[in-house]
Amino acid sequence: MAKKKKEDARQTDLYNRQSEHVLNRRKFLRLATVAGAYFLPFSSPVYSNAEPNDRILKYIRDSIGKTLRQHSNVDPLGKSIPLPYDFNVPCISVNFQNLFYYDTYFLNRGLIALGDITQAENNVNDVLFLVDRLGFVPNSNRLDMTNRSQPPYLCMMVKDIYEATRNKEWLNKAYPLIAREYDFWITKRSTTYGLSRHHHDATQEYLAEFYEHLKKVRLPLNATTAEEKIYIAGNRLAEAEAGYDFTPRFDGRCSDFIPIDLNSNLYLYEVTMADFAEVLNNGEKKLWSDRATERKKRINDLLWNETRGLYLDYDMKNERPSQLTSFAMFQPLWTRCASADQAKRVKENLKYFEFAHGVVPCEAALHDFKYQWDYPNTWPPHSLVVSEALSRYNYEEDADRIRSKYVNTVHAVFKSTGTLWEKYNAVEGNTNVTEEYKTPPMIGWTAGIYAHMRIVKKTRLG
């Protein structure tokens, strides 16, 4: 008992020294009581000891606490929505100093692998709080990013926490909030095809300012009228909601497209919510199962291309499949929406996206501008998604190869730079990337996915 208490004290001391933002336990509990919210007590993480000789895992353990930001009741700068639980941001400093929806799912996979279930749950509770307040999950809790969402992963986050804790009371509180977010996607982002799209809820004033921002620092734009500027900005903002800011994937018209990855994720929401309904015995299992059946049929009817053997986004304006193939074709495998035959045919297209050091967002092609969500960049979330997608249809050799490329690329670049990065070059295996802003060092999804692959999947270096 004395030895355990000594180790607990050592872990707590380490964790508190890692970040000036971490509240001590007494202060946390006192503020939580004053706020009147149902806070979970703060506890220092119990990190996994798997792969103890891995320098990057040690770096992640030593650094992840530095991305922790304290909960609060008010933002003194008035630029963000205060969050009720301590939360992780993607970067240690300077860049991305808010909670980001898309990033949080992949970071949480690492926190869970490292054994810090409490902090992973805190992150999810903050996302649930945002749904309760706004009716959807914004891109970030930064106020100027609350006019769009990001790819929906809340349901999957909740499932990960529930599987780790088996806390039915917590699941029962999360369930209606997931349903509320789902309702946002099927109403605010609906189409006449019965599937969903990405868009935005920005004002004309915001879009005008966003256009000027894009032109100044991100994209070579040359609109000549106010209407054209608003149109361009709106579609690029929709790309930001898609998590592909920016990309040739949607031909600059993201709002015109029905994305395969978005609708695949919503299919997984429906399947998972049916499972949750059964656990909670609330009588809604059939409702969700029927929705999943209908969405799967619509996906197959509209987004599956039998001739080419792959999934494509649908261009509503031109009433045809997208002319550009993207990594999103693997998302129906990740969500198990694809049949075995469809999965086999999609896998045959892997060669167009896989390179020596990772997978790329879009098939290599000539475009009028070099976007960052395009060849030759490789983004950490894609390595996780495609490796798990392949595993779910028993293509383990391919899945292992993708995981190996990711961890070895991250490891090699870490050896030469001493840090982790937001994205990498899939062809060269370095940080010589196409960028629309200076690529930041990043803990976030880069660390989360690395930790998951090394600890949970036992992916080897070398």
Image (cartoon, rainbow, N blue to C red):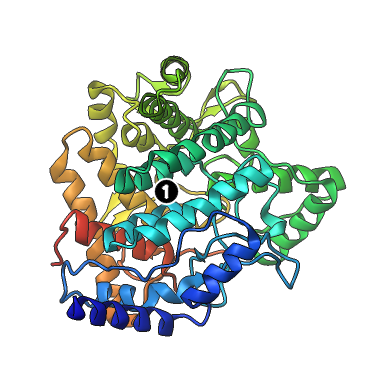
Q: Is residue 382 visible?
A: yes
**388 or 286, which is in the foreground?**
286
Q: Tag count in the figure?
A: 1
Specify the quadrant of the image occupied by residue 386.
Answer: top left
Q: Position of residue 175 (x, y in %)?
A: 49, 35
Above or below, 326 against 146 in this view is above
- Kindly identify the residue that appears in the image at 79 percent across and 45 percent down: 230
Specify the quadrant of the image occupied by residue 459.
Answer: bottom left
Q: Position of residue 445 (x, y in %)?
A: 40, 60
- Kindly identify the residue that appears in the image at 48 percent across and 51 percent down: 124
Q: Position of residue 274 (x, y in %)?
A: 40, 24
**166 or 135, which is in the foreground?**
166
**64 or 38, which is in the foreground?**
38
Q: Is residue 147 left or right of residue 60?
A: right
Above or below, 290 against 62 in this view is above
**Amino acid at circle 1:** Pro
Q: Secondary structure at mark 1?
A: loop
Q: Quadrant of the C terminus?
A: bottom left
Q: Name the residue tied to disc 1.
A: 361
Above or below, 364 against 301 in this view is below
Q: Quadrant of the N terminus?
A: bottom left
Q: Is residue 263 left or right of residue 413?
A: right
Among all residues in the image, which is located at the extreme front? 1
Above or below, 385 against 303 in this view is below
Q: Position of residue 182 (x, y in %)?
A: 55, 32
**130 or 422, which is in the foreground?**
130
- Kindly identify the residue that appears in the image at 73 percent across and 42 percent down: 201
Q: Is residue 238 visible?
A: no
Query: Mark 1 Cα within 10 Å, few/some/many (few <14, many 20+)?
Result: many
Q: Is residue 83 left or right of residue 108?
A: right
- Kindly identify the residue that appears in the image at 60 percent across and 69 percent down: 31
